Amino acid sequence: MAELWRMSATRLAALIRDRQVSVREVIETHLRRIEAVNPLINAVTVVLGEQALQAAKAADAAVAGGEELPSFHGVPFTIKENIDLAGAATTQGARALADAYPSRDAPVVERLKAAGAIPIGRTNLPTYGVGWVCESELYGATVNPWDRSRTPGASSGGEAAALAAGMTPLGLGNDGFGSLRWPAQCCGIASLKPTLGRIPHATTVDMIDMPISGQLLEVEGPLARRVADLRAACQVLAGPTWRDPWTVPAPLRGPDPPRPVRVALVAGLGIADQVRDGVHKAAAALGDAGYVVEELEPPSVEVAAQTALVMLAADLRVGWDLLPYPPRTKGVVSAMIEMAGYPDQAAAVLAYMTRQSLLRAWGEFQQEHPLIVAPISAGVPFEAGKGYTAADVAEILRGRPVTVAVCALGLPAVALPVGIGDGLPQAVQVIGPRYREDLCLDAAAALEERAGIITPIDPRPSGADR
């Protein structure tokens, strides 16, 4: 049997259910892995060892007692530090929130726990989740296990790095401007950005509820190393709750689209050769799986990306003095507001009107091409210290128009690796119509079957040192 820390969440659950391993063995293996490799990449900020071992004892007793076991019984998972876990601070990587203890778990944590999963750690993010480099004022920088001179992406970079290095088989993060998908590209793991309203978001420690831009742009979602784990997690996490008024009781599987399913491929100009090669690998793999792939761009991608930026920047201007941003974070926020053109109330209203027309245009486009396959970022993971200047922010945002457009429109997307190029993961995102995570996951599973799994890995030195 392979080492337990190398296994997927669903495989671990099956082994526990079949009594081939104990929950305690699974938890102890992952805690040892954290102890061994986390000092090299700084992904896990808080280790919940004692609590996890106590939960493992109860979980093993349930197995021994012949109880009916839920889907993730005994499987460890980690949680980004801006998602509530009772008994641990929801710091968002900020000193001001170092003692911000929630009164209850976030809905996504509640649901994974109810499915038998066991929290083993918290993971790093940029301060307040702002930026594309995983560095917080509380915990410092997380680095990429593929090349420790590079970023693991952000804002869910701690989760992605922990998964890639085998410290956890399953994680919880969120995505407002690509924060689940960019780390997946950087670290070679898989993630699901769900449709707005599919998976609930709620907290008990926010100073104020999120403004309307955040409510429309940001979603919670799972990260894993295998598409099957994303599908299983989505089944557990999805569904309405009074705690999030946006959530809806949409079915997890929709009607079958006409066959063969048509895919619009966005190869993109101005993207790195390594990224373009990955996109074409994905196209060939989907063609082999029976999809019809055509190089075609959805409507007004750049307009949709700018719309998201204006929506967010208008609220950031209002809240500029409400949060005690550290200087680097403040610089990123300032650069985003500048790129949006310092939007006022009128510009914000126009952005929401534009969003509505774009939803219709993309909805019509996806009648013929239900799936869109696109790069996540135009470039490979950059150096860990980059990403803070106005020039950096402009380059980053201009290099991921489809990624940001998907946030503006609240569409689902699965990010996953499709190979390795120049020693770094190659990845794409598979985008579907609203509430059609099933179509995204089906196509992602076909890609994974042909491309293979590239993580977990042992953390590696910088490319220059190899």
Image: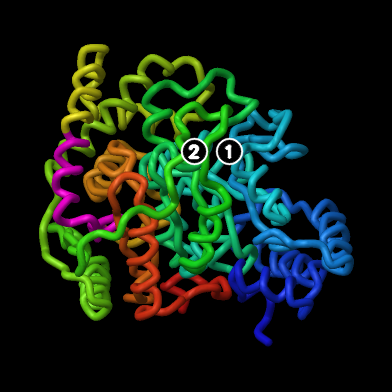
Does the magenta segment cover residue 222?
no
Tell whether label 1 touches label 2 (CB within 8 Å): yes
Are there few (<14), some (14-19), or many (20+) residues within 10 Å of tag 1?
Answer: many
Q: Which mark is residue 129?
A: 2
Q: Is residue 92 left or right of residue 63?
A: left
Q: Position of residue 250 (x, y in %)?
A: 43, 42
Q: Residue furthest bottom?
A: 1
Above or below — where is 23 with respect to 55? below
Q: On the rendered image, what quadrant is the N terminus found in?
A: bottom right
In-image side of 191 versus 324 (left or right) = left
Query: Dot 1 corresponds to which residue?
Result: 82
Residue displayed at 53% across by 22% down: 324
Question: Compared with residue 424, is residue 269 higher up or lower down, i.e. above or below?
Answer: above
Q: Residue furthest front?
A: 255
345 or 349, nearer to the observer = 349
The nearer-to-camera label among 2 and 1 is 1
Query: Dividing the picture into quarters, in which one does residue 308 lie?
Result: top left
Q: For numbered disc 1, what is the local secondary structure?
A: loop
Q: Is residue 445 above or below residue 49?
A: below
Q: Residue at x 45, y 42 (%)?
A: 198
Is residue 182 something one can see in this rendering?
A: no
The residue segment tinted magenta is 358-378
